[in-house]
Amino acid sequence: VSSTELTEHFLKRIESLDSDINSFITVNRDGALKQAQMADKQRADGLAGPLTGVPIAHKDIFCTQGIKTTCASRMLENFIPPYESTVTANIAAAGMVNLGKTNMDEFAMGSSNETSFFGASRNPWNTNHIPGGSSGGSAAAVAAALAPIATGTDTGGSIRQPAAHTGLTGIKPTYGSVSRWGMIAFASSLDQAGPMATSAEDAALLLNTMVSHDNRDSTSVAHPNSDFLTKLNTPISGLRIGVPASFFSADLDSEVGDAIQLAISQLQQQGAVIVPISLEMNQHALSAYYVIAPSEASANLSRFDGVRFGHRCEDPKDLKDLYSRSRSEGFGAEVQTRILVGTYALSAGYYDAYYRKAQKLRRLIKDDFEQAFKQVDVILAPTTPSTACKLGEKFGDPAKMYLEDIYTLAVNLAGLPAMSLPCGMAKGLPIGMQLIGPAFGEANILHLGHQFQ
Ligand code: GLN
C-alpha cells in the first residue's frame, strides 16, 4: 500500500470516528497528503527508510511550523509557531507523515485529559472513561486506530499512564536523550518526549528517530547506545528483574496486582531471575514532585504575559491589568493552581522549607534507584494503581487525581527510562505494567517488553 492510501485511510477514520473520541485538536489534512505524496516519490526513487510514509500523530505540545500548536490552552488557542521542534523535525526527516496534533491536558498538567480547553478526550475501550493524561489524545488516537503511532511527553507519567489506560506501549526515555527544543516547557528538569505505539518494536523504531543530540537544548546528551532495535530478540534467561515491595501497597487494586504477578511468574518460567527490592523512597515522590514541577512551571509559564504571544485581554487599563487579565483568561484552573503553588514554594522565606527539601528528597529517590540497579537489570512494577476511572470521577479532586501517578513520578525525578506495556484487562479496560531501566538502559526495557508482544 502507498503512503497516500495509508494516509487517506487514517484521515477517513479520524473524520468519521473522532467526534466520539476527541483525540485531535488539529487535523493536518492537506499537509499530510502532501507529505505522503513526497514519501511515495522517495519510495519509488529507492530512497525510503523504515518509517518513510508512515503516518503519525503529534501531541499538541510540539511546535510545528505553520500548524497551530495550542498545548490545549486558551492561552495558545490561535498560536501558529514560526519554527519546528527538534522531535517533529527529526520525525519529518525520517519521512513520516504528520496527521495532526492531539488533545492533552492543558500545558500537560493533569492525568485524565480533562483539563484541556478543547474538552476531554475519551477512552476508546469505553468512552465513559478517561484515556489518561496528559498525553491522552495521543493514546486515544492510537488505541482507536486513528493513527498507527504517536508522540507524547512525560513529566511525571504522561506517556506511561495513558498508555496503561489504553493498552499501548509507551516509553519515557532517559532525561536528555530526546531534545526538548521546540517542545512547550512544563517542568524542564523532568520533561521528556517519547513514542506511544502498539508494540515494543514500533516504539523502538520511533525512538531511534527521536533520540538525537541537539545543541539547542542545553540538557541534551549524546545517547551512548541509541539503536534500540538490536537487543529485541535476544533471550531473557538470567536477566535480573527487581520487584519493589513499595509499589505493591494498599493503593494497588487487586486485579492490577494479580495481572502483574501473573506476568512475573511468566518471566520466571522464561528463566528471568526475580529479585525482591524495596525502593522505600518512592513514598516521598508525590510530595517532592508536587513542589518541584509547579515551581518549574511557574517560571516557565511566566513567558505567557499577553505581550509577546498568546492570548491578550481586551482593553487593558495598564500593564498590570494586561498581565493579570490575560493570564486569568488564558489559563485554566489547574494551570493557575500550579503557578500559585510554584510561586509560593520559590518565594523568599519558603524556598528552604519546600523547594530545597524537595530537591533533597529527589536526590534520595535517585540514590535509591542507583542502589537497586547494582542488584538488578530492570525493575518491574505496575504503571498505575487502577484501570482508567470514569470521566468526572476524579476531576476537581487533586488528592485523588494526583494518586494516579504514584508509581510513575519517581522515575522522572531520577531521570531514568521507563515504559508501560499492556498486561491484561479488568472489566473491559486495559492494565499496564511498568518496566524501569538504569540511565540509558532503554534497550534493556524494550528487550524485556518485546517478550510480551
Ligand atoms: N499527572 C502529572 C501532573 O499532572 C504528570 C503530568 C505529565 O507527566 N505531564 O503533573
Image (cartoon, rainbow, N blue to C red):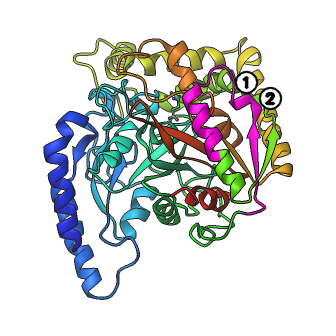
Label number found at residue 411:
none
In the image, is the residue at mark 2 within 8 Å of ligand 1 by its beta carbon?
no
Q: Position of residue 382 (x, y in %)?
A: 61, 36
Residue 416 appears in the figure: no
Q: Position of residue 41 (x, y in %)?
A: 23, 81
Residue 244, magenta (yes or no): yes
Residue 194 located within the stretch drawn in magenta: no
Q: Amino acid at mark 1?
A: Gln
Q: Give, as a three-letter code, the residue at label 2.
A: Glu
Closest to the observer, 142 or 339: 142
Which quarter shows the N terminus?
A: bottom left
Q: Position of residue 204 (x, y in %)?
A: 52, 62
Mark 1 CB in 8 Å range of ligand 1? no
Look at the image and give the residue range highlighted in magenta.
Answer: 237-263
Residue at the image position 37 percent from the left and 55 percent from the top: 149
Residue pictured at 76% horizontal, 24% vertical = 356
Circle 1 sits in a helix, a strand or a loop, which is it? Answer: helix
From this view, report whether residue 404 is shown above or below residue 182: above
Residue wearing tag 1: 283
From the top left corner, tell me how far across and down residue 221 is, in percent.
Answer: 65, 59
> Crowding near pointer 2: few (<14 within 10 Å), some, many (20+)?
some
* Secondary structure found at label 2: helix
The total of numbered circles placed on residues is 2
Q: Are marks 1 and 2 in contact (CB under 8 Å)?
A: yes
Mark 1: few, some, or many residues within 10 Å (few <14, many ≥20)?
A: some
Q: Is residue 134 left or right of residue 270?
A: left
Q: CA distance from mark 1 to mark 2?
A: 6 Å
Q: As rendered, which of 25 and 397 lies closer to the eye? A: 397
In terms of depth relative to the viewer, which is nearer, 345 or 268? 268
Q: Residue at x 62, y 46 (%)?
A: 263
Q: Is residue 66 visible in the rendered structure shown here? A: yes
Q: Which residue is mark 2?
A: 280
